[in-house]
Image: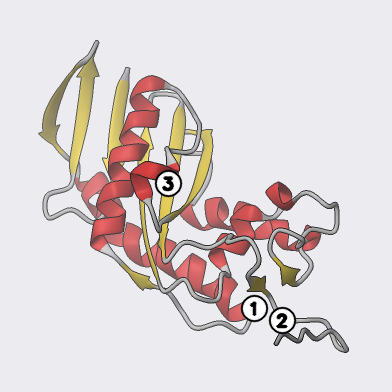
């Protein structure tokens, strides 16, 4: 199985896995160009969604990107598409995307998460979905979480699939916290 990884590394690489053994090889000019553009493109896609929600832009975080790269690589190598253990990434949120290799732009991947906006309703998390299931809006709410300030993402690929992992800090989707602008006439009070 062949896999490659893209994040903001000093030396972008393409790698070929032979069984459980991985051998690094020099990246092609095309993959170098993609790797150098990746952070800016994925960050711009996130910040476009946040601007639409009236929020401050996120900043790129290399440490989050490196952690995302390690997990994207793990998913690509194992073929297991599932969220990482929350205990292993305390205080960090996570969005995952998987699709046919090379068929979707980075912007489309992020816009797939943002498309959950159609089912979103502002409120106190987890009561933020028009359907009653916060899982149907969780990617979108993580992107627009008001206290999230940093993001780092990575893309790993097999011969058949692309795996995008984005990590967010501070984490969003926190129970009992507000997300989105409150509807007119809605207020809360406490003593």
The residue to which callout 2 is attached is 181
Q: CA distance from mark 2 to mark 3?
A: 27 Å
Q: Residue at the right extreme? A: 185
- Vertical position of residue 139 compared to residue 43: above or below: above
Quadrant of the frame with the C terminus? bottom right
Q: Residue at x 69, y 57 (%)?
A: 115
Q: CA distance from mark 3 to mark 1?
A: 22 Å
Q: Secondary structure at mark 1?
A: loop
Q: Is residue 7 left or right of residue 137?
A: left
- Vertical position of residue 2 compared to residue 48: above or below: above
- Using the image as rendered, state which of residue 61 and residue 42 is in the foreground: 61
The image shows residue 69 at horizontal and vertical percentages of 30, 44
> Residue 165 shows which numbered tag?
3
The residue to which callout 1 is attached is 53
Badge 2 density bin: few <14, some 14–19, many ≥20, Cα 10 Å:
few
Disc 1 + disc 2, Cβ < 8 Å: yes
Badge 1 density bin: few <14, some 14–19, many ≥20, Cα 10 Å:
some
């Amino acid at each position: 199985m062949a896999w490659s990884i893209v994040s903001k590394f000093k030396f972008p690489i393409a790698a070929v896995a032979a069984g459980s053994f991985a051998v690094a090889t020099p990246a092609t000019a095309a993959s170098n160009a993609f790797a150098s553009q990746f952070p800016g493109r994925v960050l711009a896609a996130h910040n476009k969604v946040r601007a639409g929600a009236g929020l401050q832009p996120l900043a790129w975080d290399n440490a989050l990107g490196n952690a995302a790269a390690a997990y994207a690589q793990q998913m690509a190598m194992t073929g297991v598409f599932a969220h990482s253990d929350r205990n292993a990434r305390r205080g960090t949120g996570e969005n995952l995307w998987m699709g046919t290799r090379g068929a979707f732009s980075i912007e489309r991947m992020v816009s797939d998460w943002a498309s959950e906006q159609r089912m979103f309703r502002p409120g106190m998390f987890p009561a933020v979905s028009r359907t009653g299931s916060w899982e149907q809006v969780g990617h979108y709410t993580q992107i627009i979480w008001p206290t999230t300030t940093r993001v780092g993402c990575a893309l790993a690929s097999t011969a058949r699939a692309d795996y995008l992992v984005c990590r967010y800090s501070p984490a969003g989707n926190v129970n009992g916290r507000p997300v989105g602008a409150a509807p007119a006439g809605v207020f809360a009070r406490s003593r």
